[in-house]
Amino acid sequence: MSAYQELAADQLRELKNQLDQEYKEYQSKGLKLDMSRGKPAPNQLDLSMDMLDSLNSTDKAVSQNGTDCRNYGLLDGIPEAKKLMADMLDVEPEDVIVGGNSSLNLMYDTMARAMLFGVPGSEKPWFQCENRKFLCPSPGYDRHFAITEEFGFEMITVPMLPDGPDMDMVESFVKKDESIKGIWCVPMYSNPQGITYSDETIRRLAALKPAAKDFRIFCDNAYGMHHLYDDDQDHVLNLLRECRKAGSEDMVYIFGSTSKVSFPGAGISAVAASALNLSEMKKRMSIQTIGPDKLNQLRHVLYYKDVNGVNEHMRLQAQIIGPKFQIVLKTLKEELGGKGIAQWTNPKGGYFIALDTMDGCAKRVVQLCKEAGVVMTPAGATFPYGVDPQDRNIRIAPTYPSVEELTVAAKLFCLCVKLASVEKLLSGK
C-alpha cells in the first residue's frame, strides 16, 4: 500500500468503504476495553501480595533506630525507608523526606506551600505573584498540568525533543521573565513519549540562571526504575547532584514513589531536595501532619530489603509488561508502517507509547475507538489545558489489558487511525 497521501480521491473512497466495513465488524463484537490510564495489571499487583505478610501482629514493629512504628514520631520517615527511597532516587538518605502513599500528593503539597508561604529565596508567597507562569514540556503528564492550572498559573508549552525539553526555549524564557516560577520534568522514560533526558539536557537544567530567585524544577522521577528490557536500558544523570555541581541545589525537588512498584494507592513516596528546602518543608509539615504511615514504610523495607530487591521485583514486572509493549509496537508497524499517517515512539521503559496522527485526527481516532468499545486517554490530555494545538498526539497505555485484550485493542486502534486519516484526506479533496 502506498502512502495514503498519494492516493487519488476514488482510491480513498474505495479504501474508506473497506475500512468502514471492518469497523462495523468490530462494533458488533461489543468490546469493553480500557487503555486510558497507566494502571498496573492484576498479575503485576499479584507480585507484591507477599508484602502484606512481611509484618504481622507477632512482630515488634520497631525501626532500626528503636522507634515504635505504631506510634507517633519520625515526621520525615523511618531511617531504613529513607535509605531505600534514597537509593531508588539515586541520592543520599539525608536528602530525603519519605511521605505517604502518593508522590502526586507530595507535588501538590509542595506547590500549595509555595503558594501560601513561598519557598527559600521568595520575596513573597507565590499567590501574591501576579501573572505567575509555569513551563510545561509537552506532550506531558496531565496531572502535572492540572496542579498548575488549579493554582492559577499560566502554563507555557515547551516542545519535547528527542533528548528532553527544548532547552534553548527554556533558557530563553527563564532568563528574561521573573514571573516564571518553575518547570515540570519527567527525566526518565517521560509520560507519554518514553523519552530519557540526555546528559546535556540535565546539565543545562542545572545551569539555568532564572530571573526568578525562587524558580523551582519539579522533577517527577516516576519511571526511574521501570525498564522494559534487561539488556537495553536508558540511564540519566541525577539532577540534584548536577545542581550541586552547578551551585544551584536549592532549585530542584525530585519526587518518586513505589506506586507502580508495589501497590498504587498503598505504596510509599519521597521527595529529595537540598537541606534548605527540606528544612522549610519539615517546618510546615510539623503543623500539617503527625507523619505518614510508618508501618507501611517498614513493611516495604522488610519485603524488598534494599534497592537490589526492588530491581529484582521490577525485572519480574518487566517480564509481564515488556511483551505487551511489543504487541502494540508490532501491530503499529504492521498496520500503519509506510502509510504516512502516523509516527510513534519506541520506549525502553515507562508506561506509555506516544503516537502522532496526521494533524487534526487525534480526537476523531479516540472517538472512533470509544464508539467501538475501546477507551483511550482523551486527545489533548497530554497538553496544558487539554488542548493539543495540532490535534495529533495520543497516549497509548498497554499495561492494564490482558494480552488477548491488548491484541484486539491494538488492531482496532490502528483501524481507527486509518479510518480517521482517510476521512481527513477526503475532506481536503
Image: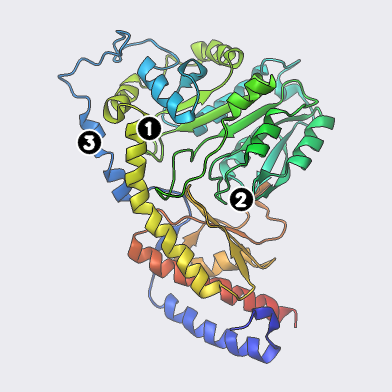
Q: Name the residue under label 1.
A: 267
Of circles 3 and 1, the one toward us is 3
Residue 200 visible somewhere in the drawing: yes
Residue 30 x, y percent position in the rendering: 38, 72
Task: Compute the Cα span from label 3 to label 1.
Answer: 14 Å
- Between 365 and 189, the residue placed more toward the observer is 189
Residue 292 x, y percent position in the rendering: 40, 20
Q: Which of marks 2 and 3 is nearer the N terminus?
A: 3
Relative to 331, say whether 217 is above or below.
above
Relative to 317, say whether 224 is above or below.
above
Mark 3 vs 1: CB contact within 8 A = no
Residue 169 x, y percent position in the rendering: 78, 42
Look at label 3 and name its amino acid. Answer: Asp
Local crowd at mark 2 within 10 Å, few (<14), some, or many (≥20)? many
Q: Name the residue under label 3.
A: 50
Q: Which of marks 1 and 2 is nearer the N terminus?
A: 1
The residue at the point 41 percent across, 37 percent down is 259
